[in-house]
Image: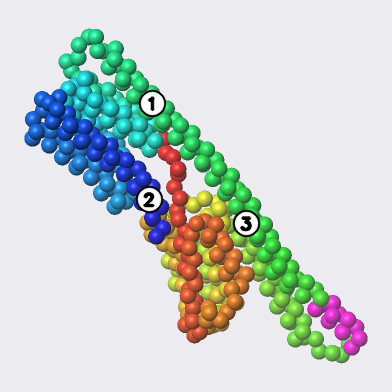
């Protein structure tokens, strides 16, 4: 389902391409029927067949992988330029209206080609059109170069407009990421206040109460009560360290190493066997993606430590699946029934973070069968490469 928007975008572009080829075929057949072409029917049929093969090739490549059509843009453009040049040469040369297909092709491809690729395509167009128009009478050279110049400048204009638009989109994306990072830091600050603050306040009040009790009854045994307060303070200290690490990790630590270290600490405290699998080289992520994913994995590990009981195994996995980065945190501990347990702040926070990245999160658990948290987020590349 995630790839459907890409196919819709490809289809919106591909349908007009078929329409242009169809209109050209109809025009050519009418020209032949009205004896305006000296081209033989078999040769005309061969040209039509080549045109249909070309657009079919584009369609097959695009439907198989919408991203691959961009990687093959220059080879496909060169093929189309050869076919158009052949068509111009066989249907009247400079006088043929088929030269307008140069215009349609370059104007459409100028938006997606690199600058170098577009310059090469323009050079091939000028050479091909000149070859198809030869021999050209001297009185037509002025018109020839005018057509080539206008065609090139319009394609270049569209190329530059698209580049400016893409750069503007990148700037907006960076601003949005900065905004999301600011929101994430505010969210961490709230969690810091609600979690750590609660533990510290409880510890302080407990110790104050013990102090008052000790003052009234010097002989009372306060060892267990004091130990409880010490445990609360240790919990608060652990949360403080985790919060600081979560804030600093995406900027100062390799994400793979940080996730592995966090999983090792949790497994050690639980006495569980750790099974950690991550690719040797993680994909390049934006600061927002790194921060969000690290926090989600940390929250999932925190839930294992709080609710899994005494699991024998802890599984932490990361892998790249096409344009998606997937992460899984699972245990074979107590588990629970998701239908009967209200969604807590931790899971809600994980959902918010993953949805912010345009990703998906799934929770699977059952009493006595452990818990699995599976998340996947899209890996976004650059919008433009010159």
Does the rendering let one see residue 313?
Answer: yes
Q: Position of residue 208 (x, y in %)?
A: 84, 77
**Helix, strand or loop for disc 2:** helix
Residue pointed to by mark 1: 154
The CA span between labels 3 and 2 is 33 Å
Q: Please, which residue is most extreme toward the front here? A: 34
The CA span between labels 1 and 2 is 27 Å
What residue lies at 70% left-to-right and 78% top-to-bottom? 231
The reply to whether the magenta stretch includes residue 209 is: yes
Prevalent SS, magenta region: helix
Of badges 1 and 3, the one in the foreground is: 1
Q: Say above or below: 165 vs 298.
A: above
The CA span between labels 1 and 3 is 44 Å
Query: Is the residue marked by circle 1 packed among few (<14), some (14-19), or many (20+) residues within 10 Å?
Result: some
Residue pointed to by mark 3: 184
Residue pointed to by mark 2: 8
Q: Determine the image quadrant of residue 323.
A: bottom left
Number of residue marks:
3
Does the rendering let one see residue 82?
Answer: no
Report the disc number at residue 119: none
In screen coordinates, is 230 left or right of 318? right
Image quarter hosting the N terminus = bottom left
Q: Say above or below: 46 vs 280.
A: above
In screen coordinates, is 224 left or right of 215? left
């Amino acid at each position: 389902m995630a790839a459907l928007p890409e196919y819709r975008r490809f289809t919106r572009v591909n349908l007009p391409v078929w329409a242009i080829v169809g209109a050209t075929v109809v025009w050519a057949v009418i020209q032949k029927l009205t004896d305006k072409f000296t081209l033989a029917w078999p040769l005309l049929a061969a040209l039509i067949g080549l045109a249909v093969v070309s657009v079919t090739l584009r369609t097959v490549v695009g439907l198989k992988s919408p991203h691959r059509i961009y990687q093959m843009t220059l080879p496909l453009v060169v093929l189309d330029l050869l076919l158009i040049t052949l068509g111009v040469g066989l249907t009247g040369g400079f006088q043929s209206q088929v030269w307008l297909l140069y215009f349609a092709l370059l104007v459409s491809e100028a938006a997606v080609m690199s600058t170098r690729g577009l310059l090469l395509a323009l050079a091939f167009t000028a050479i091909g059109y000149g070859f198809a128009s030869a021999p050209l009478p001297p009185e037509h050279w002025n018109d020839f170069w005018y057509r080539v110049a206008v065609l090139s400048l319009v394609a270049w204009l569209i190329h530059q407009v698209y580049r400016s638009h893409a750069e503007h989109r990148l700037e907006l994306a960076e601003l949005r990421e900065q905004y999301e990072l600011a929101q994430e830091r505010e969210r961490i600050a709230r969690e810091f206040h609600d979690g750590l603050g609660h533990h510290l306040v409880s510890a302080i009040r407990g110790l104050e109460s013990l102090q008052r009790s000790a003052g009234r009854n010097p002989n009372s045994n306060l060892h267990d009560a004091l130990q409880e307060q010490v445990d609360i303070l240790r919990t608060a200290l652990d949360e403080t360290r985790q919060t600081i690490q979560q804030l600093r990790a995406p900027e100062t630590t390799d994400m793979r190493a940080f996730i592995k270290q966090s999983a090792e600490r949790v497994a050690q405290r639980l006495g569980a066997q750790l099974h950690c699998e991550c690719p040797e080289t993680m994909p390049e992520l934006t600061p927002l993606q790194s921060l969000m994913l690290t926090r989600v994995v940390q929250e999932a590990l925190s839930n294992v430590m709080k609710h899994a009981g005494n699991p024998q195994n802890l599984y932490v996995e990361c892998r790249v699946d096409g344009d998606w980065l997937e992460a899984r945190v699972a245990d074979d501990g107590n588990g629970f029934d998701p239908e009967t347990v209200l969604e807590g702040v931790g899971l809600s926070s994980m959902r918010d973070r993953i949805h912010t990245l345009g990703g998906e999160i799934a929770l699977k658990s059952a009493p006595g069968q452990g818990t699995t948290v599976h998340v996947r987020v899209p890996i976004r590349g650059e919008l433009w490469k010159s």
